[in-house]
Image (cartoon, rainbow, N blue to C red):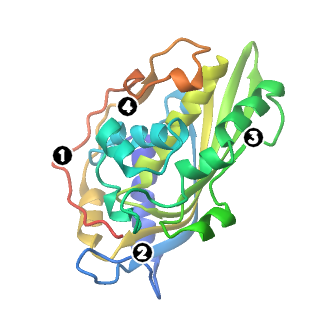
Amino acid sequence: MTKADEIFKQNIKNILDNGVMSEQARPHYKDGKTANSKYITGSFAEYDISKGEFPITTLRPIPIKAAIKEIFWIYQDQTNRIDVLEEKYGVKYWRDWVIDDGQTIGQRYGATVRKHDIISNLLTALADNPWNRRNIIDLWQYEDLAATDGLKPCAFQSMYDVRRVGDDIYLDATLIQRSNDMLVAHHINAMQYVALQMMIAKHFGWKVGKFFYFINNLHIYDNQFAQANELLNRTPSEVAPKLVLNVPDGTNFFDIKPEDFVLEDYQPVKPQLKFELAI
């Protein structure tokens, strides 16, 4: 059992056994019914990417290719336009969060990155002094949240630090998430930000180090309890998957493409489970 599979099962069991039910829940299902959830607070995990520990479960297939394309939409294209995500990358499932303009998800995610020049500022700070302790991406900008309707960012903040070990420099990353759907989005969000960590490391020619993942509210929706128990009863793959970024060290961040990523040795348990998304 991989570290990710072990953590996944521990989290599911913890939520089912010790979680509490939500109250005054905002999300809803497509039929309009309130999407309540059972949740725990303060979930933390640590993965050492340099040792082959990747935050992806083998208990069910995770759409990592689509997840990584979202990172390019947010941090390279730096846009909130849904047509870019759908037509350029073929990722369709964000349409439920389009606002009344029919074209965007509001002043969120990529639009916030562009408005505040977040990536350029981050790369400049790391270039000027890799050992500074101020390398932060923060998508929770109150001015932006008030400007339009739209889903408020879930994975909203990440931080980056370097370590020298012998002759090598490692880039560590921390992802902070306010809310996470344990069965659907947990490994999608984690692997997205590992991919972003790898892109930044490649830009500077550094190695990828540790990935820290903190979630404030980790939940399972009330229509997913059967799937949760199914996952607990599954036997994970014995093979540990890994994500590889096939570009030379020093490749400019904006020159990296989604197809440069390869997920190796991924043998997830099937069949896939079905989940109704909460909107």
Residue drawn at the location 55% of the way across and 59% of the way down: 107
Circle 3 residue = 135
Q: CA distance from mark 2 to mark 4?
A: 29 Å
| Residue beneath disc 2 | 17
Residue 175 visible to an observer of this rendering: no
Q: Which mark is residue 270?
A: 1
Tell me if 76 is positioned left or right of 240 in this view.
Answer: right
- In the image, 2: left or right of 197? left
Question: Amino acid type of disc 1?
Answer: Lys
Q: Secondary structure at mark 4?
A: loop
Q: Report the quarter where the N terminus lies.
A: top left
Amino acid residing under circle 4: Pro
Q: Residue at x 84, y 28 (%)?
A: 129
Q: Residues within 10 Å of mark 1 (few under 14, many from 20)?
A: few
Q: Nearer the viewer, mark 3 or mark 4?
A: 3
Give residue 214's quadrant in the image.
bottom right
Q: Which residue is mark 4?
A: 241
Amino acid at pointer 3: Asn
Mark in front: 1 vs 3:
3
Q: Earlier in the sequence, mark 3 or mark 4?
A: 3
- Residue at coordinates 18% horizontally, 46% vertically from top-left? 270
The mark nearer the N terminus, 1 or 3, is 3
Nearest the viewer among 223 and 240 is 223
Q: Nearer the viewer, mark 2 or mark 3?
A: 3
Q: Quadrant of the C terminus?
A: bottom left
Q: Bin the neighbour count of mark 2 within 10 Å (Cα to Cα): few under 14, some 14-19, many 20 and up.
A: few
Circle 3 sits in a helix, a strand or a loop, which is it?
Answer: loop
